[in-house]
Image (tube, rainbow, N blue to C red):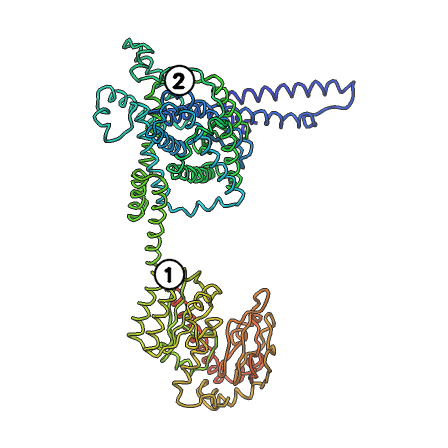
């Protein structure tokens, strides 16, 4: 049974083997007792079968608890860093409240998402991008309060604003989930997402600087940041960044991050002890956080705070609030997609939106702020072994314990350690989106991404996203305009209708078929692609005599008003050259667009399909260039030309049977034995194949053409049905007559075989030309 333990470590193997031994001994004892007490109980009894699932469930629960414990401890580190990031600067004296609000958000987020997520091992809590936008919103609000002289009442309205924004985010997420609109975020251009994340990285780097030195990374603070005291702190934070970089690259163990953070804290306290710096001195010098008094975080939703809240400030903060809503939605969906890729576990986007929306509503009601699905902590939980909802519940329990214990532990945490973690995350985002993306993005996309990041940093998230969408649309329009609207083009000498014509007509089409110029259009036709089409047609008509211009719209998904104007210009050029325009396979939307532009008139032919249009054009070309009435030729004249002599013609006629059929009459059916070939003297015969719901015509044959020769030679069953389309006269050569000719008349047999090979070669040549047209 050793092979069954390959997925367990040594301790688990020993424990599992001990359990098996105990169960085996119990079963043997029961078997021994059964000699005198009753029926035996074997190892395959129901007691043994019910023990294994319980053991497996117990082991799974342990793995979930372990994964949740690891993720919970990592969440503590991240949450403390996010709280220090948001409650920095003027809000630094109230960091304890920020810690409490953060762990309320983590507890509620982890609890609700664990219970409602479609991916049971999902971990939720404040995330990097949402925390950056929250910090931006809070900083702008505090700046407004200070500018309006409300410096003595900052904390309460800030907490209310954070809860209010979380409530709005929850309403939006639930609305999107109920409306099943989650996939709409997929239409946001990639450079917009990259620019947003790149700007998020820079804001996180600036926030890390403020956590470490109490000063944001800005040009006005350069001299202060270059002071010896600040440089020492930044150097210590840089050491944390370097250790995280190399440690996480070298070791894939999920405990490395936690170990490095704890090692950084221990190293800082050893340095303080070695240099004789007390905890109080380190706090005074800004190396440690100042001790936080126990806080009693009351609910922000009360009448007194509502009446004192500066509601006029919301008009100036509307952009930041909308940015938070957009960023949270985008983060939920992007992180969910990342979890799907990392764990290969399909998620329900609408259910995730509802779960995170509910978590934010509950978090807002209890005084928390925006919470989100965490990609890093979820994948960490999955790598450790967490597969069930118990992991998220464990994270919620740990966060709740930290919330109950208070923020007293923060006085012993070096600022540069948490700042280093923020700095590492911010630098990673900067490298990932502003440097490394250069390798796999086009030049235009990369420039767009960098420009969007700069716009966000200069004018805010909403301006950056909106301008980014405009840039993305313009870039898309430019790229699509380079795509030719013509999928492939052809002329009547190389691409024919499905009507099989007699040799003299085929010769006319070979000679004059270029007077038919056709184009298969595709994609969406708009001002860029339609203008290129206009230029192409103008150049074509300038060098080629043309009677008919065919445009097939089967692959066109839509058309705008500027494209209809381009077709008006094409018609003007065609009229000057004497060419008639023909449209085929117009969709209802495209036809309505043309009719709205009053473009379709008697001068424009609208055909149901390309084959019908081609047949009509070919008839017109043949009629215009025929010098005599070829249809007056008799059967004997046709056979004389085909077989190389009147004698062969007379002998073949004697072996053939005349058949006259009416329209829609079946001549032979698909699957019947191939016991004859037919010479069509007059009329028209359609070749039909089974198309499922209804037969499909694949070809038509006119006068002086043959059909069934391949079946006669190979003796394979009929591959298609022959059905008369008009009153037709055919001459049938049966298989028995054909065999008699082969035995008794070698000269006629040779002439007939030469004719059949010539017909097949002509059809093969046409098929090759048609394939060549389709492969352009």
- Image-quadrant location for residue 516: bottom left
Q: Note whether 207 is above or below 266 in the view shown.
A: below
Looking at the image, which is closer to me, 113 or 253?
113
Looking at the image, which is closer to me, 488 or 336?
336
Provide the residue designation for mark 2. 410
Where is residue 54 shown, x and y percent of the image?
62, 26
- Image quadrant containing the C terminus: bottom left
In the rendered structure, the answer to whether residue 261 lies left or right of residue 607 reads left
Q: How many marks?
A: 2
Circle on res. 526: 1
Q: Earlier in the sequence, mark 1 or mark 2?
A: 2
Where is residue 373 shown, x and y percent of the image?
47, 34
Q: Secondary structure at mark 1?
A: loop
**Residue positioned 33% across, 52% down in the render:** 474
Q: Note whether 402 is above or below 563 in the view shown.
A: above
Q: Residue at the far top: name it.
A: 276
Proximity of marks 1 and 2: CB atoms separated by less than 8 Å: no
Q: Note whether 26 is above or below 174 in the view shown.
A: above
**Residue positioned 78% across, 19% down in the render:** 37
- Image quadrant containing the N terminus: top right
Q: Secondary structure at mark 2?
A: helix
Looking at the image, which is closer to me, 217 or 763?
217
Mark 1 crowd level (few <14, some 14–19, many ≥20, 10 Å Cα): many
- Image-quadrant location for residue 150: top left
Q: Is residue 187 visible?
A: yes
């Amino acid at each position: 049974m050793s092979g069954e333990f390959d997925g367990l470590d040594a301790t688990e193997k020993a424990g599992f083997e001990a359990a098996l031994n105990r169960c085996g001994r119990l079963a043997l004892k029961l078997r021994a007792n059964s000699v005198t007490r009753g029926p035996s109980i074997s190892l395959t009894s129901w007691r043994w079968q019910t023990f294994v699932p319980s053991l497996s469930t117990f082991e799974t629960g342990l793995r979930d608890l372990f994964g949740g414990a690891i993720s919970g401890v990592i969440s503590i580190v991240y949450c403390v860093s996010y709280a220090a990031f948001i409650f920095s600067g003027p809000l630094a004296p109230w960091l304890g409240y920020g810690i409490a609000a953060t762990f309320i958000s983590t507890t509620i987020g982890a609890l609700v998402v664990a219970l409602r997520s479609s991916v049971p091992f999902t971990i939720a809590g404040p995330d990097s991008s949402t925390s950056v936008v929250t910090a931006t919103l809070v900083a702008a609000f505090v700046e407004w309060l200070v500018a309006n002289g409300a410096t003595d009442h900052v904390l309460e309205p800030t907490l209310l604003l954070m809860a209010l924004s979380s409530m709005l985010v929850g309403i939006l997420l639930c609305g999107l989930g109920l409306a099943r609109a989650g996939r709409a975020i997929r239409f946001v251009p990639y450079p917009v997402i990259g620019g947003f994340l790149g700007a998020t990285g820079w804001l996180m780097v600036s926030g890390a600087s403020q956590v470490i030195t109490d000063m944001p990374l800005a040009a006005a603070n350069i001299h202060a940041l270059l002071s010896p005291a600040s440089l020492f702190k930044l150097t210590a934070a840089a050491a944390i960044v370097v250790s995280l970089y190399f440690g996480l690259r070298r070791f894939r163990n999920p405990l490395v991050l936690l170990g490095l953070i704890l090692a950084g804290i221990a190293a800082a306290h050893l340095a303080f002890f070695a240099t004789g710096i007390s905890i109080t001195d380190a706090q005074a010098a800004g190396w440690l956080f100042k001790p936080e008094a126990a806080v009693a975080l009351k609910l922000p939703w009360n009448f007194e705070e509502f009446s004192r809240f500066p509601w006029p400030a919301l008009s100036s903060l509307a952009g930041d609030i909308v940015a938070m809503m957009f960023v949270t939605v985008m983060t939920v969906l992007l992180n969910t997609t990342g979890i799907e890729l990392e764990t290969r576990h399909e998620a329900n986007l609408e259910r995730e939106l509802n779960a995170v929306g509910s978590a934010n509503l509950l978090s807002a009601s209890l005084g928390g702020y925006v919470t989100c699905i965490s990609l890093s902590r979820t994948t960490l939980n999955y790598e450790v072994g967490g597969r069930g909802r118990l992991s998220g519940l464990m994270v919620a329990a740990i966060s709740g314990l930290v919330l109950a214990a208070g923020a007293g532990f923060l006085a012993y945490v070096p600022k540069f350690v948490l700042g280093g973690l923020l700095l590492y995350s911010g630098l990673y985002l900067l490298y990932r989106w502003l440097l490394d993306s250069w390798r796999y993005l086009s030049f235009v996309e990369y420039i767009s991404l960098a420009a969007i990041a700069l716009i966000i940093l200069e004018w805010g998230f909403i301006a950056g996203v909106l301008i980014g969408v405009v840039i993305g649309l313009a870039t898309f329009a430019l790229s699509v305009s380079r795509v030719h609207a013509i999928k492939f083009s052809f002329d009547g000498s190389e691409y024919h209708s499905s009507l099989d014509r007699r040799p003299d007509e085929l010769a006319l089409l070979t000679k004059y078929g270029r007077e038919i110029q056709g184009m298969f259009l595709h994609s969406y036709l708009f001002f860029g692609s339609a203008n290129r089409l206009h230029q192409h047609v103008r150049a074509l008509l300038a060098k080629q005599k043309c009677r008919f211009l065919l445009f097939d719209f089967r692959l066109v998904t839509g058309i705008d008003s500027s494209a209809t104007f381009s077709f008006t210009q094409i018609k003007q050029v065609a009229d000057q050259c004497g060419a008639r325009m023909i449209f085929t396979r117009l969709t209802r939307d495209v036809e309505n667009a043309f009719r709205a532009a009053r473009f379709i008139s008697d001068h424009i032919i609208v055909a149901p399909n390309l084959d019908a249009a081609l047949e009509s054009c070919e008839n017109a070309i043949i009629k215009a260039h025929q010098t005599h009435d070829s249809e007056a030729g008799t059967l004997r004249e046709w056979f004389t030309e085909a077989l190389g002599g009147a004698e062969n013609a007379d002998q073949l006629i004697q072996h053939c049977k005349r058949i006259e059929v009416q329209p829609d009459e079946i001549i032979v059916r698909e699957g019947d034995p191939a016991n004859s070939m037919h010479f069509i003297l007059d009329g028209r015969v359609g070749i039909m194949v089974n198309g499922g719901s209804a037969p499909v015509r694949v070809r038509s044959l006119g006068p002086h053409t043959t059909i069934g020769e391949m079946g006669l030679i190979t003796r394979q069953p009929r591959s298609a049905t022959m059905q008369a389309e008009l009153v037709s006269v055919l001459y049938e050569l049966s298989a028995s007559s054909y065999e008699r000719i082969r035995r008794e008349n070698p000269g006629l047999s040779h002439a007939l075989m030469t004719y059949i090979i010539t017909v097949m070669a002509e059809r093969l040549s046409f098929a090759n030309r048609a394939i060549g047209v389709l492969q352009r």
